[in-house]
Amino acid sequence: MIRSFKELIEKVQNGEPQTLSVAVAQDADVLLSVWNAYQNRIIQGAYLVGNEKEIREIAKEQGIDLSKFEIVNEEEKPEACAIAIKLVREGKASLPMKGFVDTSVALKALLNKEYGLRTGNLICHVGLMEVAGFDRMFLLSDSAMTIAPTLEQKVDLIKACTQIAHAMGNDNPKVAVLCAVEKVNPKMPATLDAAELTRMNEEGEITGCMVKGPLAMDNAVSVEAARHKGIDHPVAGNADILITPDIEAGNILNKSMEYFAKCEKAGCIMGAAKPMVLTSRASSDTSKMNSIALAVLAAQAMGKN
């Protein structure tokens, strides 16, 4: 089972080679992450769609060899996103990456009815975190896409995370449905959803993982905290996947782990025909490279199914 980004990168290096299609590539961190991904054999190449003049200027400043990539000149960001998606749709590239552009603009192209990669599945964000002091990585959803997930959408979030967990070598990941408390409270709808998701898993409606909720954050990741609360369940204290009640909780948890815990992290969009590399524009080039590796892993797993 993959337990670090180092191990993740090693796995994708030995998988089916993938080619990126970067939408709006004129950004130093974006170009550095793509260059680092190429040098680390995470990808075999990339289409850089965007302002060619700016791309070349940034590449020169950063010492990036553009001869390894193909530049597609398009100065307008919406059009650049459309081209990047079409390159994937046409099979010239393996998966898309959002560059220096608003997420809404990139997603509009991703979900375009004519040339996009929509499948009918919920489009959601899956984050991956490597946290010091833990013997495993954590998958997190949804911190960026699904504002207030319904019960049915939470099932989809679990499925998306489980798909990646399986690709990481975890055949039966432990899913914690996070709430503020670990007891069902009719006044707290998230706890009702959590209990129902647990029931659905127990009765075989959600498969490929083990689900428990409601669980507070402490008794989801700390065996000691779970024991202190008297919670006796395999998921308690041992969660691999964290499902948050809404986007606010997910986003705050995600960024708290980055800025307070200084964890390494990655993120990608699941639910389309191909995973999409998606990170905050403020993310470092290392985080972006990790996200490329995560999306490549998901794409390789999709190719096997």
Image: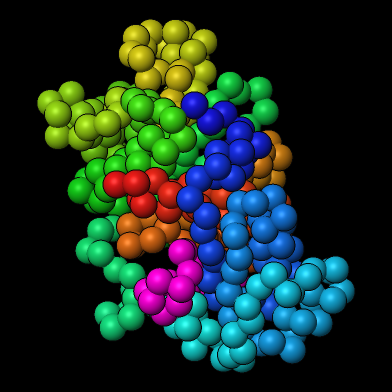
Residue 88 within the magenta-colored segment of the rendering: yes
Magenta span: 86-106
119 relative to 48, above or below: above
Q: In which quarter of the image is residue 227?
A: top left
Q: Residue 136: where, in percent of width, then height?
A: 55, 26
276 relative to 287, above or below: below
Give the residue displayed 55% in from the left and 42% down from the top: 14
Give the residue displayed 66% in from the left and 42% down from the top: 264
Comparing 108 with 89, the one in front is: 89
The answer to whether residue 13 shows anywhere in this view is: yes
Q: Residue 266: where, in percent of width, then height?
A: 57, 48
Give the residue displayed 87% in from the left and 74% down from the top: 61
Residue 43 within the magenta-colored segment of the rendering: no
Is 131 on the left or on the right of 153, as rendered? right
Is 139 on the left or on the right of 184, as rendered? right
Give the residue displayed 32% in from the left and 41% down from the top: 158
How is the protein colored in the picture? rainbow
Q: Residue 72: where, in percent of width, then height?
A: 59, 85
Q: Residue 276: where, in percent of width, then height?
A: 46, 62
The answer to whether residue 284 shows anywhere in this view is: no
Q: In which quarter of the image is residue 99?
A: bottom right
Comparing 219 with 84, the one in front is: 84
Report the number of numbered marks.
0
